[in-house]
Image (tube, rainbow, N blue to C red):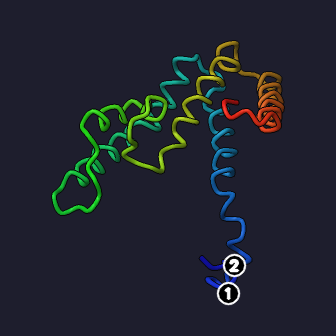
Amino acid sequence: GSSAAVQFPTAHTWLAYGCLGVQVFFVISGFVICLSGWGRTPLAFFASRASRLLPAYWAAVVLVTAVFALPMVAYEAVSPSDALLNLTLLQQPLGADRVLGVCWTLWAEVRFYALFALCVVLPGVNRRRVVLFCAGWTLAAALARASGEPFL
């Protein structure tokens, strides 16, 4: 309820840009996704993304679901069907409860992977396609934001 300057009098100037963490993560992730698609087929691209992401994610979902099911835990347990649906990364579009609230970013990443694979990896990654994709993505984001349309 109070300002960062009050809470962290000596560190608040260094911590003032912490709110940009998610955006910085997405920028770095975009570079990593581009590099992981370079010289690969779409199948190899998706395999590299899945092998990086899914094992740790599945372990976290199973662990958190198990802990929340314990009788002494104050949090409400997630239903078994919602927990299983979380393993597919489709809980958000299908309206199921998320086991891990912080994993909302994964649905955004999955959509980006699909779009990147379709527009850049499938036709063959090269510098020109990457630059065009990035320019188009930036333009589309600016137009979507300016439109005020929630779907976009």
Q: How many marks?
A: 2
Q: Is residue 99 left or right of residue 123?
A: left
Residue 102, given in percent of the width and then of the height, sits at 48, 50
Q: Quadrant of the N terminus?
A: bottom right
Residue 39 appears in which quarter of the rendering? top right
Q: Which residue carries the number 2 mark?
A: 12
Question: Element at badge 1?
Answer: loop
Q: Which residue carries the number 1 mark?
A: 9
* Above/below status of 70 relative to 151: below
Residue density around tag 2, few if under 14, some if 14–19, many if 20 or more, within 10 Å: some
Residue 26, given in percent of the width and then of the height, sits at 65, 44
Query: What amino acid is found at the position of numbered circle 2 in the picture?
Result: His
Residue density around tag 1, few if under 14, some if 14–19, many if 20 or more, within 10 Å: few
Q: Quadrant of the C terminus?
A: top right
Q: How far is mark 1 from mark 2, CA to CA?
A: 6 Å
Furthest-top residue in this view: 123
Residue 134, given in percent of the width and then of the height, sits at 78, 31
Q: Is residue 54 left or right of residue 37?
A: left
* Residue displayed at 65% across by 17% down: 118
* Residue displayed at 33% across by 44% down: 61
Residue 149, given in percent of the width and then of the height, sits at 73, 32
CB-based contact (under 8 Å), mark 1 and mark 2: yes
Residue 21 appears in which quarter of the rendering? bottom right
